[in-house]
Amino acid sequence: MATTHWPGGIPRGIKHYPKTDLSQEELREEVKGWLLFVQESWVPRDRANVSDDDKEYELRQCRALVQKWASESQEFRDSFHNRALGNELNYPLEALEHVSNTQQPCETRHVVCIAPIDATYPVNRARWVKLAILFYRYDIESGHCLPFDNVIPTAAVLNPETTSTCSVEDFLPWYCLENAEFPTIQMTRPGTFEKDIEFYAPGYLALEAAGKGGEYDFRRLTEPDDIPFDRKPAYQRMMADVMAGGRPPL
């Protein structure tokens, strides 16, 4: 699977939502206009007469919608927000059918390198190979020192047109915004994007807002597998939709 980069880099006008402590009700309120906008704007590939051979049709449309929402006036975004109902918190099914085609080649639970390690960075590459070797056990127990199956270290190949650094704060935009991955991201009423960052990396967004994202202590990260499924934000949003009478999102 190839890395996906936004041509020309992620537009500078697309930014993180600044508030980090949204309740589920507040989150639903912030993104409902965006989801209505996507529902009314989405053009399925059969209606656009696009064949299944075009693996990036949905990707191009997702990017276009994200950029349009972020660049439009607040009056435009408010026009959708004021018409949206809570049970409309779902992406069109057609927008999600081919998401796997453009997902980044990365398993976030595993070991990920954000420094460049291609052939033009031989020192970085040598260090990465040595580190990857050290992750394996050499005592009587076989396997990997991390509690996952089939752990293969991966590299996040960042987009040089998006960022010139290789810092912690560059990872999430690469992972879910370069490819405008629905439903991982949701755009808010002010035109920024929201992700379940605070749940898994408590305190990170506050540091990022202060320009100190690179100082984040990795020991504060929450391991997704350690969180009961019924406490995860995606599950809570799905259940909130079901309780409100809507269909559960995919």
Image (tube, rainbow, N blue to C red):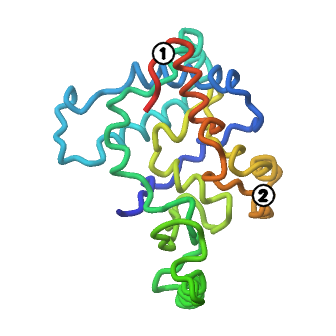
> Looking at the picture, how far across and down is residue 78, in whole percent?
60, 16
The residue nearer to you, when weighing 201 against 11, is 201
Q: Mark 1 = which residue?
A: 246
Residue 220 vertical placement versus 40 (above, below): below
Would you identify the image quadrant in which residue 198 lies? top right
> Looking at the picture, how far across and down is residue 136, in whole percent?
56, 83
Q: Residues within 10 Å of mark 1 (few under 14, many from 20)?
A: some
In space, the residues marked 2 and 1 are separated at their CA atoms by: 35 Å
- For label 2, the SS is helix
Could you tell me the amino acid type at mark 2? Answer: Arg
Q: Mark 2 = which residue?
A: 220
Q: Residues within 10 Å of mark 2 (few under 14, many from 20)?
A: few
In the image, taking residue 193 as reference, residue 49 lies left or right, namely: left
Whether the residues at callouts 2 and 1 have beta carbons within 8 Å, the answer is no
Residue at image x 43%, y 33%? 250
The residue nearer to you, when weighing 152 against 144, is 144
Could you tell me the amino acid type at mark 1? Answer: Gly
Q: Earlier in the sequence, mark 2 or mark 1?
A: 2
> Looking at the picture, how far across and down is residue 121, in whole percent?
53, 85
Residue 129 vertical placement versus 208 (above, below): below
The residue nearer to you, when weighing 35 against 87, is 87
